[in-house]
Amino acid sequence: MTRPYNFSAGPATMPEEVLRLAASEMLDWQGSGMSVMEMSHRGSEFISIYEKAESDFRDLLKIPKNFKILFMQGGGLGENAIVPLNLSKGGVIDFVLSGSWGQKSHKEAGKYAKTHIAASSEEAGFTSLPDPSTWQLSKDASYVHICTNETIHGVECHNLADLKALGSNAPLVIDFSSHVLSRSVDWSLIGLAFAGAQKNIGPAGLTLVVVREDLLDQAMTICPSAFNYKLVAAADSMYNTPPTYGIYIAGLTFEWIKRQEESGQSGVAAIELRNKAKAELFYNYLDSCDFYENRVNRLDRSRMNIPFFLKDESRNEAFLKGAKANGLLQLKGHKSVGGMRASIYNAMPIKGVQVLIEYMREFERSQT
Amino acid sequence: MTRPYNFSAGPATMPEEVLRLAASEMLDWQGSGMSVMEMSHRGSEFISIYEKAESDFRDLLKIPKNFKILFMQGGGLGENAIVPLNLSKGGVIDFVLSGSWGQKSHKEAGKYAKTHIAASSEEAGFTSLPDPSTWQLSKDASYVHICTNETIHGVECHNLADLKALGSNAPLVIDFSSHVLSRSVDWSLIGLAFAGAQKNIGPAGLTLVVVREDLLDQAMTICPSAFNYKLVAAADSMYNTPPTYGIYIAGLTFEWIKRQEESGQSGVAAIELRNKAKAELFYNYLDSCDFYENRVNRLDRSRMNIPFFLKDESRNEAFLKGAKANGLLQLKGHKSVGGMRASIYNAMPIKGVQVLIEYMREFERSQT
């Protein structure tokens, strides 16, 4: 069976090996006689799945011991409230905006704290990340929030800012939903990172939160217990019943990443090399032709989500129809940006990008 | 392959047909070339899955048109905060307590509203449901909360109280997590019902909320947007990315229930007949012997969760060991109650109860 290439921004394409293994274990996980869906979250079988997933995720991203990893529910939009409920102490939150997700976080946080836009590229249509030298950080912010990969606008932060060097003592909070596990992370610069699973990890409905231990104990009293980081951390993510099957699939994905090798590297380093190569291939093609274009500042271009436009937009519909007929799915851009978008997460093989470029060349020829 | 009988209180045993179908469609849902996990929640394929699941659930429980069905995240513990955030208006909430889950809901609601215990069977060790004639309902409560099946204590509400007849104009809120779809529901008496999926529906991480439309628009300003019923309802549960795979599995379970037939009945009516027969068989056995006992008031006994005790508790460990060796899993009682518990949800066939009783008889013989 040849599977189509699925460029959905999320929920998104998954490694075929992961899906095959999940299918084969659906009725009987490793001789237990149970599907993972049927296991008590407090039983030894599921606990072993959970512990392996937690430890593999920590290894893959080299997460230091003074950070807790929480497997939660609620997604990115949920975290837009859950983070300020846990970290803001009702104070000021600084936001650096480079796209829709940062905007959404900023709006929601206003329910729980004062918010301050330290920098924004909105006027330029969110085609860049504001340069740290221009950020107007508050004196005593509870934290600084950045969405480090804007799924909709295709803007990625390639070098985390050192807030201390910018004169701020606030912890940095990053929403890394759409590029988690696609690259290494410098945890020395971070207080908290969160990610919905449905891009690079697994099924929608699972949210990973990585939080420095010293930030755990400052939730507002109105924070729902199920979303209180301290309670969740103290119960090893079993304060309420976690999304067990999602954690299992996430664990299979982590094992898949660990097995990846590229140019002498393995794990996330291998994946990162591949992601660079995939993105370079696609951007080079876009920049080399007159028929298509990407409008994002070159230094801030995302390796995961690549919005592009047909210069003649009257051809959009024909482009999408032809793409689908060629097994290239979900290329329509987000309605707020228009045009096309190719999301090329970890699970998208370079072959998928090559086939897409081939189709785009042929489409151009057919139209000119 | 013979699968063991899994008496877990949740996540719990699932219909084998559902698991087989999910396994067979894991890599390619109905010729789409995608796993359901990989589908955009806004694509036509997933929308069709969602709409079928919503409509089947409505049909199965005969939910009137003036109720919205929301597919959310957060679980029962999440709803303990989400319900008062949406419905309490900061006023008074009445609670009727017959077990641990009611207690937890009561405690959490205190963060957002005044709470009043209208009745409680705590002094009697939560072995009954307080009789409605004894309830001390408030004059102007925002709502009255009852957990209608106490998973831990094995107490079930078999006849919903008519609050109007008791002199209250408040809407009734029920937590029906652990007996949803096991019996019919009289919606004329209900304002809101919620259920975590992991007992009778599907994987943990999906929460169903059924809410009367006139209750949608009264959330507190501090309610997180992702958990605001009005926003979720207006977006047909796509305000944030819903737990798509869980919704798919739930849909398969709904279709399985629709196919069930028993004594000329089908769907939930058939399932209810079977559940009655299973529970009667097991309670009759417990009541007929001196070796085991159930301590719940006969009129309030749960058809789903049956706690029982060996009169000589020094034999507990041997009992559990022998059960596991006989393919009878997860019979240990909740730590707060002790003893044993058999959860016999919809997906547990009567054969499972028969095999359990057979084992219990043999165990008794071996010990006496």
Image (cartoon, coloured by chain):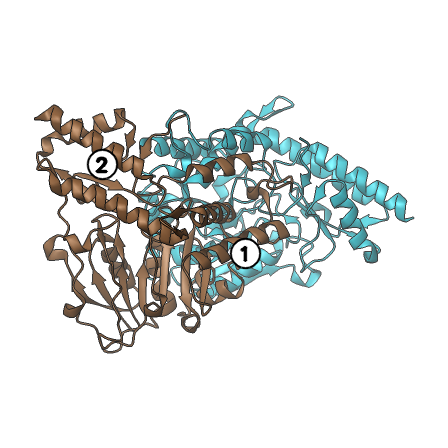
Chain colours: A brown, B cyan
Query: In the drawing, does residue A366 fall left or right of residue A148?
Result: left
Q: Chain of mark 1?
A: A
Is any atom of residue A285 visible in this view?
A: yes
Taking the spot 54% from the left edge, 35% from the top edge, the residue there is A24
Above or below: residue B134 compared with residue B54: below
- The residue that mark 2 highlights is A332
Indicate the quadrant containing the C terminus of chain A: top left, top right, bottom left or bottom right: top left
Query: In the drawing, does residue A256 fall left or right of residue B341?
Result: left
The image quadrant that residue A292 belongs to is top left
Farthest top residue in view: B264
Mark 2 or 1, nearer chain start: 1
Report the front residue among B356 and B151: B356
Is any atom of residue B151 visible in this view?
A: no
Q: Give the alpha-carbon distance from disc 2 to disc 1, as whole Å.
A: 38 Å
What amino acid does circle 2 point to?
A: Lys
Q: How many other residues sit within 10 Å of disc 1, few (<14), some (14-19) or many (≥20)?
A: few
Indicate the quadrant containing the N terminus of chain A: top left, top right, bottom left or bottom right: top left
Farthest right residue in view: B368
Q: Indicate the position of residue A350 as horizontal and vertical percent values.
A: 30, 39
The image quadrant that residue A29 belongs to is top right
Q: How many marks?
A: 2
- The residue that mark 1 highlights is A51
Label 2–label 1 contact, CB within 8 A:
no
